[in-house]
Every structure is written in C-alpha cells, then in structure tokens.
Amino acid sequence: MLESGSTLPGIHLAYTTHGELNETKDNVVWVFHALTANSDATDWWPGLVGEGKIFDPANYFIVCVNMPGSCYGSIGPLTINPETNSPYYHDFPFFTVRDMVKTYQPLREFLGIRKIHVGIGGSMGGQQLLEWAIEEPELFECIIPVGTNAVHSAWGIAFNESQRLCIECDASWNEKNNNAGMKGMKVARSIALLSYRNYITYNASQSEDINDKIENFKTSSYQRYQGEKLARRFNAFSYYSLSKGMDSHNVGRNRMSIENALQQIKAKTLAIGIITDILFPDEEQKFIADNVAGAEHISIHSNYGHDGFLLEFEQIENIISEFLTKQNVVNYKFQSNDRA
C-alpha cells in the first residue's frame, strides 16, 4: 500500500550490483540515483564508482536500484497495468520518496544485506537516503547525502510545477502513447537546467565569442539541445511522476517534526553542500547536519551549481576519504583487495 492509499498487486525493480559481498557482509555501499539517472552508478557517477575510484568494486559490494516511476526497468508509467492489460500512463500510482524506500527493503533482504557500510546519494537520491536512514536507523553505518534536503522547498516545488505545466500544455499529453507530452518535456528540461546550473555557469560556457550577434545565440541552441538529449532517453510520464515524488519529500511527515525525524538517524553522517547550488542551497545541508547527532557538514565550490554533485569528483572523493578516516570507519580503498 502506498502513502496515497493506492495498492499494487506487486512491483518489480531493476537494480545493478558491482563487486561481491564479503564473508562478513560489511562492505556494502548503496548508491541512490537522482531524478533521470539509472541503476548503474558507474554510468552517471564514474568519478566515484568504478575501478580505481573511492568506491571500487574490487573492495565493495555496490548496489544501486532504479527508483519506481522511472523508465529504466523498474515499475513505471509504461509498465502494463494488470487490471487493464495496457500501460498505466496517466494512471500510474503516485509514489512518494518514502514509498520508494519501502520498495527497496525487500530487495535488501533478497540480497542478504543486514548492514550497509555506506549509503550515498545526491539530489533526489539523497532524499531517499535520508528517508531510509530514518526508517531503519540501525541499517547504515555511514550516510553521505550530497546536495539534497530534509524537506523539498517551496522554491524546488515551484520549479517542478513549472516543468509539469510545460508538459500539460503539450497538446499530445492527454494521449495514451509512449511519446505523449515529449515536446512539453523538452521545454521542462530547459527550465530544469536553469536550476541545475547558475549565472556563472552559463556565462562561462555559453557567452558569445563575437559581439555583433542579434540572434542564434549559443545558449539558445544549448537549451534546445538539452531537451532533445533527454527526449532520446526518457519519457514525459516518468518525468512528471518522479517530479511529484520529489515534491512529496518531507522526513517530518507523521513524525512530529522534521527535526525530530532527523534526530532518529544513528548513522555517522556527512552532509555535503555546494555553495553555488540554487536548487538545493547549502543551507539545507547545514540544516541536516545541525539536526543529526554528531553529523558533519562540508561545503564545496563548483561553477556548475547543483550539477556539481555529479561533476566535482576530486573534491567529493577527498572529503569522503577524510570523513571515513576521521570516523574510524573502515575505508576499503586503502586496504588490500583480499577479502575477509
């Protein structure tokens, strides 16, 4: 049963693992992906996950699951509804972030995981991480939320609602086919980019080399290109559904308060913020750290704003290494590859 009251006869999840669970089952790293990513963390986070990286499959058992509502294998709007024998489309049940986390619990049990050494995720992935660390306080040894929040802000919801309005304005949105709303989603993505980046980013990468232009600007073609790029790999139904899931995020719901919910976390916590992030401002990371016992907050600078969590590998890797060492947590990166 979902928080909305809807029920499903069953669910399916797509997930990717790298490495092997060791004999003592204490080398698990669970990675949570962001809005439009997939379950293979080496694909979208190659600077942190992969051979020779801080989370190396030679040392860790790395798990990442595709969130429900996405289009990369888990149950989503294009899944066949068993009641109608046709895709859910607009009728796909509403999954909150908390609902998503509850679908991961049976997968954890199926994989034989009793304890997670490190949980890490950025943006919407960090939202899921916080929810799970509250739901099962004994599960995680360490958690590292990056560029995320404990409750989705009015500012963030406004961005998401504006994007959904773009999709709704697409004349094809009410159709029941896989490509419905795609033009609207392209526009939505161009709005999203404004929140993922910032003034500095655009001026640095999209400013014109000559001063006599009156049209056909680089930044105009860039916005269109990014919409087309997403349309080649995603669909408007998943985009619409997942953005609503993000808006639902509030760890304090039915837990007295946001502060009280964060105080339930027992994992050693490192909240990483990005100073130039206008979508998930650094103050939201500080709020997390201020309300989780013993938590640490570190800020990084990035010209890429919110997208810095996907791009500033070197800074983030160094911070994580120092954190694990300081907390006296086993950091397998600096140990022999021989398993216990």
Image: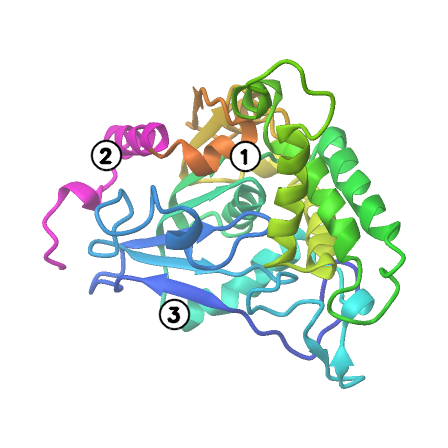
Residue under circle 2?
328
Q: Is residue 272 left or right of residue 189?
A: left
Mark seen at residue 263: 1
Q: Which residues are magenta?
A: 314-340
Check disc 3: other Cα within 10 Å, few if <14, some if 14-19, many if 20+.
Answer: few
Is residue 25 positioned above or below 192 on the image?
A: below
Is residue 282 positioned above or below 216 on the image?
A: above
* Numbered disc 2: secondary structure: loop
Mark 2 or 1, nearer chain start:
1
Is 324 part of what is drawn in magenta?
A: yes
Is residue 100 positioned above or below 289 on the image?
A: below
Q: Tell me which amino acid carries mark 2.
A: Asn
Residue under circle 3?
111
Q: Tell me which amino acid carries mark 1.
A: Gln
Q: Tell whether label 1 touches label 2 (CB within 8 Å).
A: no
Front position in the image: 117 or 37: 37
